[in-house]
Image: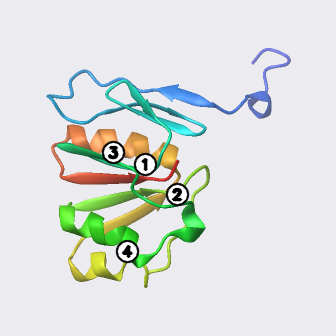
Amino acid sequence: MKAGNNAHSLKPISAMKLHLTQAAGNQLITGYGAGWVEVNAVRHAQSLIVMPNQFIEGWAAGDFDSLAEQDFVKLAALKPEVILLGTGSRHRFIHPRITRNLTDAGISIECMSTAAACRTYNILMAEGRHVAAALLI
């Protein structure tokens, strides 16, 4: 290791461009950064739902703290195998009472930062999974 090379001096990534060799006509998250997510090379600055076969902009009315049961009714109606809840810039957990309708419908929900949800969505989508990414911007 050269003098001055220190893992602690690395700067965090503020934006990332994602590449997948083939999306096969699916909705693909192609980039993300602070305050935006890019789906099929189109940038969006509102919370959204991305699934392989559809895209819904304007999903949640606010930020993580304002999420309510009603926000997850639309998600349950889409009947995904799993929902990746992108909770914004940091990883947070949602209270189970808010997502009870998902549990009752047999739909799994995984909470992670929005950046992690974007990366995980692309992997699961490429595997052919019926996944939904519900992303707070």
Q: Position of residue 62 (x, y in %)?
A: 54, 60
Q: Residue at x 21, y 28 (%)?
A: 23
Q: Give the residue at the far right of this rendering.
A: 4
12 vs 110, left or right, is right
Q: Which residue is mark 3?
A: 121
Q: Whole-Å distance between the Cαs marked 1 and 4? A: 21 Å
Front label number (1 vs 2): 2
Q: Whole-Å distance between the Cαs marked 3 and 4? A: 23 Å
Q: Are marks 1 and 2 in contact (CB under 8 Å)?
A: no
Q: Earlier in the sequence, mark 3 or mark 4?
A: 4
Q: Whole-Å distance between the Cαs marked 1 and 2? A: 9 Å
Q: Whole-Å distance between the Cαs marked 2 and 3? A: 14 Å
Q: Earlier in the sequence, mark 2 or mark 3?
A: 2
State the scheme by which the image is colored. Answer: rainbow
Assign the N terminus to one quadrant of the image. Answer: top right
Q: Quadrant of residue 21?
A: top left
Q: Quadrant of residue 121?
A: top left
Q: Which mark is residue 87?
A: 2
106 vs 35, left or right, is left
Q: Earlier in the sequence, mark 1 or mark 2?
A: 2
Disc 4 is placed on an element classified as helix
Front label number (1 vs 4): 4
The answer to whether residue 123 is above or below residue 66 is: above
Q: Amino acid at mark 3?
A: Tyr
Q: Amino acid at mark 4?
A: Gln
The answer to whether residue 92 is above or below residue 58 is: below
